[in-house]
Amino acid sequence: MSAKSAAPDQDGKPPEAGLFYGWYVVAAVFVIMTVTAGLGFYSLSIYLKAFVAERGFSVSATSAATACFFAASGVTGLGVAAFIDRYDPRWAITAGAIIAATATLGAGYVTELWQLYAFYVLFGIGYAGAALIPGTTLVARWFERRRSVALSYASTGLSLGGILLTPLAAWLIDNLGLGGAAPWLAVMFILGVVPVTWLLIR
């Protein structure tokens, strides 16, 4: 169902028949941004600390690898934007979540420098597919006159992720080690993104 066919009231106000469906999309994007920011963007410093302390990589090498996350995310974002203009954004979000979760799981097995770089590149690709670009695009499609309000609500998830999930990721890694925490973090990424994507996003 397209936004146009399901959302005749594009001002974002609840119609008489019930709540405007765009707000359900906002809720879904809020959750997705909470998870991707908390377990992705804001957790980069946690991974840096773990790779240095547990795996013996230098701070400079790990910082350089972290830069690959931003490079991969930026380049991938261009492709994601083009993809969601033509195809169902849910596939981009799902693929991004799976790639990010796979990278997270692989973090537990990183022992070589090339593996460290591969982790950050894959993590950046997955983050770009699941996070900000698809989310803001989806919300913008559903709203016109109240677009800025809807985007503000959805983007609040970015901060909430840093408040709630990043400390949880740090606790898991501190107590279980990178290898023990990685499977849990990967599962959290999938369960936090994929179900809400297919249940609420149209």
Image (tube, rainbow, N blue to C red):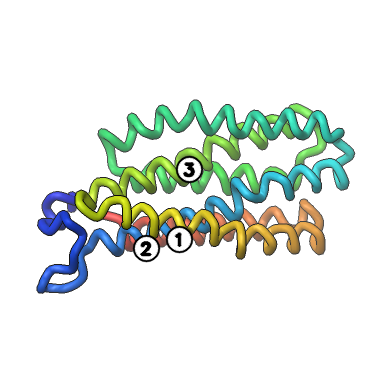
Looking at the picture, does residue 183 appear above or below residue 129?
Answer: below
- Residue assigned mark 2: 27
Q: What whole-number distance in Å separates the C-alpha atoms at marks 3 and 1?
A: 15 Å
- Label 3 secondary element: helix
The C terminus, quarter of image:
bottom left
**Front one among 198 and 160:** 160
Badge 3 crowding class, 10 Å Cα cut-off, few under 14, some 14 to 19, many 20 or more, is many
Q: Position of residue 8 (x, y in %)?
A: 10, 56
- Residue assigned mark 1: 31
- Upstream in the sequence, badge 3 or badge 1? 1
Q: Amino acid at mark 1?
A: Val
Question: Which of labels 2 and 3 is toward the front?
Answer: 2
**Front one among 90 and 69:** 69
Q: Position of residue 186 (x, y in %)?
A: 61, 54
Q: What whole-number distance in Å separates the C-alpha atoms at marks 2 and 3?
A: 19 Å
Q: Is residue 187 left or right of residue 7?
A: right
Looking at the picture, does residue 60 appear above or below residue 17?
Answer: above
Q: Is residue 54 left or right of residue 35?
A: right
**Residue at point 20%, 49% (across, down):** 144
Looking at the picture, does residue 11 appear above or below residue 77?
Answer: below
- Label 2 secondary element: helix
Kindly indicate whether the residue at mark 2 contacts the one at mark 1 (C-beta within 8 angstroms).
yes
Q: Amino acid at mark 3?
A: Gly
- Residue assigned mark 3: 96
Q: Quadrant of residue 12?
A: bottom left
Kindly indicate whether the residue at mark 1 contacts the one at mark 3 (C-beta within 8 angstroms).
no
Badge 1 crowding class, 10 Å Cα cut-off, few under 14, some 14 to 19, many 20 or more, is many
Q: Is residue 7 left or right of residue 68?
A: left
Q: What whole-number distance in Å separates the C-alpha atoms at marks 1 and 2?
A: 6 Å
Q: Position of residue 129 (x, y in %)?
A: 45, 40
**Residue at point 41%, 40% (across, down):** 133
